[in-house]
Image: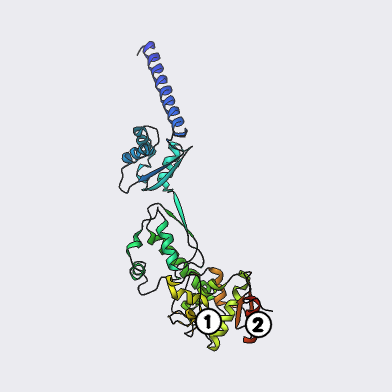
Amino acid sequence: MGTEVVRFVIRAFLALVLLAAAVAGAGWWWLNQPLVLSQPVLELEIEPGTTPRGVAREVVKSGVQTDARALYAWFRISGRDRQIKAGNYELAQGITAYGLLQKLARGEESLKALTLVEGWNWRQVRAALAREEFLRQDSAVLDDAALMQALGRPGVAPEGRFFPDTYTYAKGSSDLAVLRRALHAMDRRLADAWALRAASSPLKTPDEALILASIVEKETGRAADRAQIAGVFSNRLRIGMLLQTDPTVIYGMGEKFDGNLRRRDLQTDTPWNTYTRAGLPPTPIAMPGKAALMAAVQPEATKALYFVARGDGTSHFSPTLDEHNRAVNRYQRGQR
């Protein structure tokens, strides 16, 4: 081989090396350049079973202004093309081709949040679920019995069985999945509380603790009064005295309640009317939070059998009916 040929081969080889380096550099630059989006935030939906080539096309269709073939080539070259996960994603300004693949391979879906509020009843939970436009409304066609069957709790009433908290979910998730998480969260919270119950508690089962906690939740105007309110109800249960708590009456009235509780309502019997029936009602009347659960199982040691709202969020507690009547006259009727 002549000298000139050798030189030509060397020059050609160097040119190829430089070309490869230039291509690699351009590729690296492209991977780390922010992609151009048609809007500040794009919604990208990847259906289950979509091929990597189809994913690249969906990315472009969503509003990412790049070449779908280049994206697909990047997916393949990276070796992570088969790791891309179906789901709903948000693509924001500044995302790069490298970051896009990372997001898709990790399954970093865009999440929404649903908050279940302490003291809500089941009707309010149903309404909150119905308002979540990004949840799949699988429970909407189910009555309460069928819904609890679907959640693995046949024969259990849904009232109070879901822990009030904020739950995140991916767009398109089933509302049953969110409810199942809230149900299991309440199971754990109730079990934890029950394990710490006071030895003197009149409650016989975790379900009774849940029911009492729901009443405490609805009766408490100030957090500091919660344990003492639970103490009053525990005292009444212990001696067989009627609980006579207005929230249970209101719950039993359902949608008939117009905001005013009248004497005839207190005298109208329902399974939840604790003025006409002894003991705890058959189900919770709302979702209790952690503090109410703990108050129910660890009530304050008190001699009080009565309490009345002062009108400022606090309550006045009395051990005797005479003192209670004086407190009612003072705080409810404005008499001194």
Q: Characterize the local packing of mark 1: few (<14), some (14-19) or many (20 or more) Cα atoms within 10 angstroms.
A: some
Q: Name the one closer to the observer, 299 or 128.
A: 128
Q: Quadrant of residue 314?
A: bottom right
Q: Residue at (56%, 82%) from the top-left corner? A: 234
Is residue 284 in sight in this rendering?
no
**Relative to 107, 220 lies left or right:** right
Residue hosting label 2: 326
Q: Is residue 136 above or below residue 35?
A: below
Q: Quadrant of the N terminus?
A: top left
Q: Name the one closer to the observer, 316 or 213.
A: 316
Residue hosting label 1: 244
Q: Is residue 174 above or below residue 18?
A: below
Where does the image place residue 208, in percent across and percent down from the top left? Answer: 48, 79
Q: Residue at (60%, 83%) from the top-left corner? A: 305
Q: Is residue 111 above or below residue 285?
A: above
**Relative to 231, 153 lies left or right:** left
Spatial CA distance of label 1 from label 2 is: 18 Å
The kind of secondary structure element at disc 1 is loop
Contact between labelled residues 2 and 1, with CB atoms less than 8 Å apart: no
Q: Amino acid at mark 2?
A: Arg
Q: Amino acid at mark 1?
A: Gln
Where does the image place residue 226, in percent across and percent down from the top left? Answer: 59, 73
Q: Name the one closer to the observer, 308 or 239.
A: 308
Is residue 275 in sight in this rendering?
yes
Q: Name the one closer to the observer, 72 or 207.
A: 207
